[in-house]
Image (cartoon, rainbow, N blue to C red):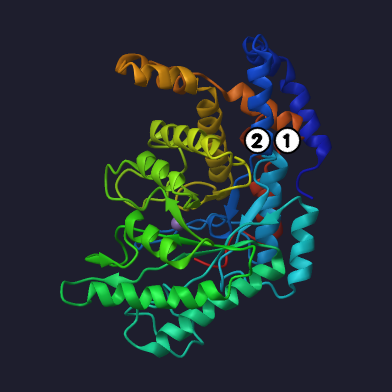
Amino acid sequence: MLLNSDQIAQHNEARLAKHKQQLAPWTGEVDKTEAIIEKLMAYQVAIPSWALGTGGTRFGRFPGGGEPRSLDEKIDDVGLLHALNRSSGAISLHIPWDIPADAAATRERAAALGLTFDAVNSNTFQDQADQPESYKFGSLQHVDAAVRQQAIDHNIEVIRHGVELGSKSLTVWLSDGSCFPGQLNFRQAFQRTYESLQAIYAALPPDWKVFVEYKAFEPNFYSMTVGDWGSSLLYAQKLGPQAYTLVDLGHHLPNANIEQIVSLLLMEGKLGGFHFNDSKYGDDDLTVGSIRPYQLFLIFNELVEGMDARGMNHASDLGWMIDASHNVKDPLEDLLQSVEAIQIAYAQALLIDQARLADARNANDVVTAQEILQDAFRTDVRPLVAEARLRAGGALAPLALFREQAIRQQLIGQRGAKAIATGL
Ligand SMILES: [Mn+2]
């Protein structure tokens, strides 16, 4: 065990006086403060198995050492994150990178660390060594029925693995599309994709959801067959009540109003969940909140208001997942930063006085409406987030504790300096 509860307790003890001081201004508004802390404690973010190793770009990859070499070690890493922040209580797996050799044992290992399995992800965007058909020209959209069937079978196999692990949802992200005008008949590509998705949908257990993830461009650069929230919603509506749209923050054209998309999908009961990340230009997969924290806050404003309007449970009614991975940071430190950024945006959104905001809107008082939002955004809620962690048994300062305990050095000692994560 790289980190035990005594070490966390010692770390917290040393920081407690300062934390209490920072929390003091909040204790005057007990009801509001307690409500936010409780919601933060219930809220868990799923960690993607592919973010635990150093990412890369098409130009290169610079592994950092001590990366998880197996599914078990990936689960251990998420367990470590969860021990530090008590908010990373789920893991999202990618098949075939993370096929469990013994599902019951994998499930047990995760449960011992307080982890559950969030959505399982299929992969038809690259060819595996042993597969007969190639996805070079698409998978579910392919003109050849044999390729489509192979991709359908793969998705059904992913569901089967997910069932064994206790997962309740499948995320389908397709790289299908075209790189040049004339390459594809859009209508027929849509229709073939829809029929393939129907076959996958038919294999879903009754208590499962399927998330249809969209992406504007890359790896196809002329058209993507699930290219925007409109086409994803179309598939989800046609498929039926178990199908939902998944919003990946990096999968839009520049300057898209993501918060408006979120609001409308929620209104239609078709928002399934999120892939959190941040970006400056395209699908940059940067640390959540590192580039556009205000956008993240505005998205959470729509989420809180929209979920409350539908009587939804913030913690459990949507899939909350990170999808980020890059080249220059320690992946575990990066994930601690991402989870904290999500919690901060969530807590700030919970601060918004929605009744006052509605009054300002109804009075066409644009200035007050903006003030209400920015008051919340400019409030330092970090003491609340830290208090939620403390009460849940986590560390007051997870990143600091990660470094104090030299956890990366310990991982390198166990796994080696040249250990490279399986998967991407
Ligand atoms: Mn994604």
Asked whether, in this view, residue 270 is left or right of residue 118, the answer is: left
Residue furthest to the left in view is 181
Q: Nearer the viewer, residue 284 or 359?
A: 359
Q: Quadrant of residue 103?
A: bottom right
Residue 57 shows in the view? no
Residue 281 shows in the view? yes
User: Residue shown at 56%/66% (left/top)?
Assistant: 94
Asked whether, in this view, residue 251 is left or right of residue 90, the answer is: left
Q: Residue 129's x, y, as percent?
A: 49, 84
User: Residue shown at 77%/56% (left/top)?
Assistant: 111
Asked if residue 197 is positioned above or below residue 301 in the image, the reply reads: below
Q: Nearer the viewer, residue 31 or 14?
A: 31
Query: Looking at the image, do the residues carrying marks 1 and 2 touch, with CB atoms under 8 Å apart?
Result: yes
Q: Residue 194's x, y, as percent?
A: 39, 73
Q: Which residue is mark 2?
A: 398
Q: Which residue is mark 1?
A: 394
Q: How many marks?
A: 2
Q: Quadrant of residue 40?
A: top right
Q: CA distance from mark 1 to mark 2?
A: 8 Å
* Ligand 1 rendered quadrant: bottom left
Asked whether, in this view, residue 332 is left or right of residue 80, the answer is: left
User: Residue shown at 59%/47% (left/top)?
Assistant: 317
In the rendered structure, which amino acid carries the disc numbered 1?
Answer: Gly
Asked whether, in this view, residue 142 is left or right of residue 172, the answer is: left
User: Residue shown at 53%/37% (left/top)?
Assistant: 342
Q: Secondary structure at mark 2?
A: helix
Residues packed near mark 2 inside 10 Å, few (<14), some (14 to 19) or many (20 plus): many
